[in-house]
């Protein structure tokens, strides 16, 4: 297992994470693939070993489980990891008081605590070695509060802010942190959130996970502060940051809320199927 630099990708079993793993393997990195679905990780590992000749470790972990997450963080802290893609995440949609409280809490564990814990575990080693790259998958959803996706948007606000703050804090250390803040991307995300119907909406100008992952990896290689792929996501980001709340909330109430209203019911069923 020598001769390769190692990259860790969380949420590598589908969507953006799967494409981040492909992109990193194409660049010659050995990979740790982290998610819950072992079968999907094993299939991807086989493809990357055969296609790129890189070593791949499959590390099944439920990042919502504090014990399992702690074990993973301790294990990774002892490894020479050059790249961390803290990408795993999932949405909860619907009125907060009616959403499944277990799912709501799990989303905070995965979208916020896991990102925080794994970065804390890997960063000291990167700083000691004087090089390392961190890519945090936040979201344009993190640039404003989103009624009916309150917990998700708040979690992504944490991710966005945390990544940008670390970027500035790490200046001159040889280690960088880049925020990847996508808008709508066609992945399993919408099925998980019970929002399949959203994917019919063409005005959202969907990007492919490959395009988003490649933009993120280019940003990571250059040590950029933030990557917002595509013009629609850039516009969302500007609007979310600068529109007064008094104007934003009525707009969200008439656009987003009706789309997310039924998501809650569909979400439990979809997670049970995975
Ligand atoms: N798709 C979009 O429009 C969009 C937009 C902005 C930001 N994002 C963000 O992009 C990231 C990747 O999402 P995606 O769009 O690629 O969706 P996806 O295809 O559903 O991928 C989500 C990944 O997160 C993993 N994950 C979820 N819960 C987990 C848990 N408890 N423990 C470990 N891994 C877990 C999933 O793996 P398992 O199910 O195998 O555990 C999967 O690999 C997320 O952080 C999401 O918030 C997505």
Image: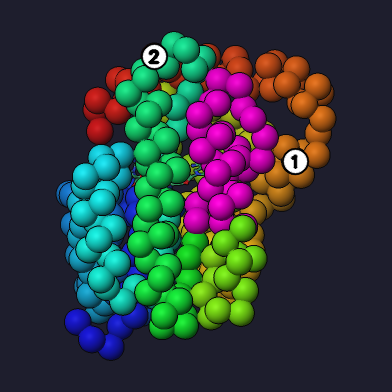
Above-or-below relation of 33 to 49: above
Above-or-below relation of 258 to 181: above
User: Mainly helix, strand or loop, the magenta region?
Assistant: helix
Q: Residue furthest top?
A: 98
Observer-nearest of 234 and 116: 116
| Colour treatment of the image | rainbow
Observer-nearest of 46 and 118: 118
- Residue 55 within the segment the image draws in magenta: no
Q: Point out the quarter of the image occupied by ligand 1.
A: top left
The image shows residue 200 at horizontal and vertical percentages of 54, 28
Q: Residue furthest bottom?
A: 3
- Residue 141 within the segment the image draws in magenta: yes
The part of the chain drawn in magenta is 136-164
Q: Secondary structure at mark 2?
A: helix
| Residue behind mark 2 | 265
Q: Mark 2 or 1, which is nearer the eye?
A: 1
> Which sits earlier in the primary sequence, circle 2 or circle 1?
1
Observer-nearest of 156 and 171: 171
Can I make out residue 64 in this image? yes
Residue at 19 percent of width and 82 percent of height: 1
| Residue behind mark 1 | 241
The image shows residue 180 at horizontal and vertical percentages of 56, 55
User: CA separation, marks 2 and 1?
Assistant: 30 Å
Q: Residues within 10 Å of mark 2 (few under 14, many from 20)?
A: some
């Amino acid at each position: 297992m020598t001769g390769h630099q190692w990259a860790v990708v969380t949420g590598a079993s589908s969507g953006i994470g799967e494409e981040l793993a492909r992109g990193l393997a194409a660049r010659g990195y050995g990979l740790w693939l982290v998610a819950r679905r072992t079968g999907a990780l094993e299939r991807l590992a086989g493809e990357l070993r055969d296609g790129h000749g890189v070593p791949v470790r499959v590390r099944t972990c439920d990042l919502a489980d504090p014990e399992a997450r702690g074990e993973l963080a301790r294990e990774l802290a002892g490894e020479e990891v050059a790249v961390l893609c803290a990408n795993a995440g999932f949405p909860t949609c619907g009125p907060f008081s009616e959403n499944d409280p277990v799912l709501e809490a799990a989303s905070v564990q995965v979208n916020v605590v896991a990102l925080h814990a794994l970065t804390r575990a890997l960063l000291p080693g990167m700083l000691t070695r004087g090089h390392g790259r961190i890519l945090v998958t936040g979201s344009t959803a993190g640039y404003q509060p989103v009624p009916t996706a309150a917990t998700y948007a708040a979690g992504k606000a944490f991710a966005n802010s945390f990544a940008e703050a670390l970027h500035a804090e790490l200046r001159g250390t040889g280690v960088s942190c880049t925020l990847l803040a996508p808008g709508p991307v066609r992945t399993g995300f919408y099925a998980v959130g019970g929002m399949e119907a959203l994917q019919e909406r063409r005005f959202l100008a969907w990007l492919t996970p490959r395009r988003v992952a490649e933009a993120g990896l280019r940003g990571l290689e250059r040590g950029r502060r933030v990557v917002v792929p595509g013009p629609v996501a850039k516009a969302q980001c500007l609007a979310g940051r600068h529109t007064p709340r008094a104007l934003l909330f009525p707009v969200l109430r008439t656009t987003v809320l009706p789309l997310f209203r039924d998501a809650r019911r569909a979400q439990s069923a979809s997670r049970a199927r995975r």
